[in-house]
Amino acid sequence: MPRGEGMSDDVPSVADDLPLLYRAMLPELVALRWPEESRATCADCVMRPDAPGLRPGWPTFADPSRCCTYAPSLPNHVAGRILRRGGPGAARLRARLEETLDGVEASHIHAPGAMRRAYDGRRPGDFGNRTDLRCSYWSQGRCTIHVDRVASCRTWFCRSVDGRHGQLSWSALRAGLFAVEEALAERCVMDGEPPGEGASMEAFVEWYRWCAAHVDGLPPQSLAPERGAAIRAAVERRDQPLPDVVVPLVTHRVGSGDDLGLSAWSLYDLTRAPGWLFRFLSRLDGQRTWREALTATRAEWDAPIAGDWPERLWRLGLLSRPDDHMATSHDIAIAAPVSVQQVTVTGRYTGHPPRRE
Ligand code: SF4
């Protein structure tokens, strides 16, 4: 999810910017490899209508806010960190609160109801294109709360260097971070004195700042470690090498002829398909090896076929193990409730972070 224009796209670790508490609850953040998503360059958006490589008929993001046509919910302690940090993010957050207290709760600041309904009712092609869906915290080409952005914004990319497997690993991480965010928000509500019904904006501002300070003061050793098994499994799955026998996995097909694009997970992450590809894919029957299929395809195709294609297709997720039933992000979302020092989060928390495109 975007860094602001003019910001660096070097992303050494997803643990950057996160409170130490998050790292204590999710050690996988630091221990596992999280590649730089170099195919989703935000400062030079790969989805803008004139971006190189896009073909006629492929989806684009025409609104300047691009993938920030979204309505994130801020947990109370995150809102407090933004307010405490000051600067443009705090100013945007205050402007959001001044506009209306609709969606403002002790546990979260949600988008106002009208915006939530507009986002939930979006139609294909609206995401990235409808100006009225712009996030409240986006301004003049950048996210004003980038350092404190929530799980859904930290882990969403229009494209992934590891294709479908990369997306699944980010989805698992999103579920883990979301669980931590929710657990801490709930903990604040239980430990503190939230504003009552009809409270003023300033009362909420004070409350959110208290939540940030309270979370900072929670001793890491008293926190139950977050469940990271799903994250570890998704990363291991992402990093597995190309096996000898694979089958095709294509979920999206856009355009035709020279403009045909294929993907194994998203309309936005299309790979242009050369003419020989379908002959190759049609030979992957779960019995013969991909080398045999490639040799047979080369024998009937006039032009040369580069030998690195199978590896590329595997990394993009367009090839799959025969026994790998196609997983979705929901399949690997953390399903168990989260515990923070005897506080078990149930009810509102479903184990699934908010969905976005
Ligand atoms: S908080 Fe808003 S502006 Fe920032 S990354 Fe998320 S959607 Fe974009």
Image (cartoon, rainbow, N blue to C red):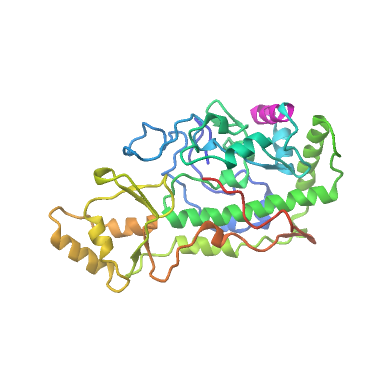
Where is residue 177 shown, x and y percent of the image? 63, 52
Q: Is residue 236 left or right of residue 187?
A: left
User: Would residue 164 be found to the left or right of residue 187 on screen?
Assistant: left
Number of callouts: 0
Q: Nearer the viewer, residue 113 or 176?
A: 113
In the displayed structure, does residue 128 sit left or right of residue 181? left
Residue 88 within the segment the image draws in magenta: yes
Q: Main secondary structure of the magenta part?
A: helix
Height in image: 228 above or below 70? below
Question: Which residue is found at the position 28% from the left and 61% from the top?
Answer: 281
Q: Position of residue 145 (x, y in %)?
A: 62, 35
Is 261 on the left or on the right of 113, as rendered?
left
Q: At 62% across and 55% down in the image, what residue appears?
A: 352
Residue 196 rendering spot, x and y as whole percentages: 86, 39
Is 224 located above or below residue 122 in the figure? below
Question: Residue 123 in the image: x percent, y percent?
Answer: 50, 40
Q: Is residue 68 visible?
A: yes
Q: Quadrant of residue 193?
A: top right
In magenta, the rendered stretch is 87-98
Residue 30 appears anywhere in the view? no
Q: Which quarter of the rendered image does ligand 1 occupy?
A: top right
| Identity of the residue furthest to the bottom in this view | 287
- Does residue 145 show up magenta in the picture? no
The quadrant in which residue 45 appears is top left
